[in-house]
Amino acid sequence: MLLADQRRSRWNGLLVRRGFEALTRAESLSGGTPGPYALQAAVAACHARAADYEDTDWSRIATLYEVLAARAPSPVVELNRAVAVCHAYGPEQALALVDALNAEPALADYHLLPSVRGDLLGRLGRHEEARAEFTRAASLTRNERERQLLLSRAAGSGDPGAGRQT
């Protein structure tokens, strides 16, 4: 299920509170320099603090991913940062980040790269390009449910309301 479609009121409150407590402890022990796991936990905490998807502090998440990329560089971190940048600052800025990842060998067969790119292109009204990216993403995943979701997104990429984030 896509994060945007999840009802956060159904998340396990006890586990969320325990996560917040663990993050607070980790932050107090880090001496002001959180490691990669603490940064990832801080991203998760941003999601958990928001009442719903629309209330998520995307600019904070983009900043956390920027710091994470500096401390533990990874093309997947950069892809995640692009998603946060899209929500915080718009799809144009995010597409530039994603396009820079197209030549990354580690992501050559990673279905989420064309999936994210398709989403960004759809948000920009470039529906034919979005359809091609979603179709490519569907061909790369081994998960049948993901494949069906991506093919559905490809079929609906001419619909302006189809710009849901994967």
Image: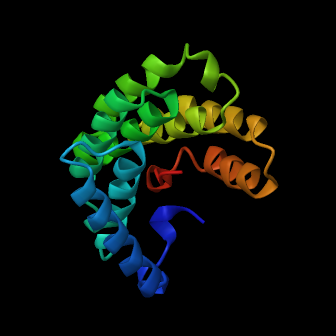
Q: Nearer the viewer, residue 13 or 135?
A: 13
Q: Nearer the viewer, residue 129 or 113?
A: 113
Residue, far left: 32
23 in relation to 143, above or below: below
Q: Nearer the viewer, residue 127 or 30?
A: 30
Which colour scheme appears in the figure?
A: rainbow
Q: Quadrant of residue 132?
A: top right
Residue 69, horizontal then vertical, whole percent: 36, 31
Residue 121, horizontal then vertical, whole percent: 45, 34
Q: Quadrant of residue 107?
A: top right
Residue drawn at 35 percent across, 54 percent down: 43
151 in relation to 113, above or below: below
Residue 130, horizontal then vertical, whole percent: 54, 35
Residue drawn at 40 percent across, 71 percent down: 19
**For the N terminus, which image quadrant?**
bottom right
Residue drawn at 61 percent across, 49 percent down: 153
Q: Nearer the viewer, residue 68 or 120?
A: 68
Residue 77, horizontal then vertical, whole percent: 45, 36
From this viewpoint, is residue 124 visible?
A: no
Task: Locate residue 70 relative to residue 89 in the image: left or right.
Answer: right
Task: Locate residue 59 relative to residue 99 in the image: left or right.
Answer: left
94 in relation to 22, above or below: above
Residue drawn at 32 percent across, 28 percent down: 70
Q: What is the total number of numbered labels drawn onto the structure image?
A: 0
From this viewpoint, is residue 125 visible?
A: yes
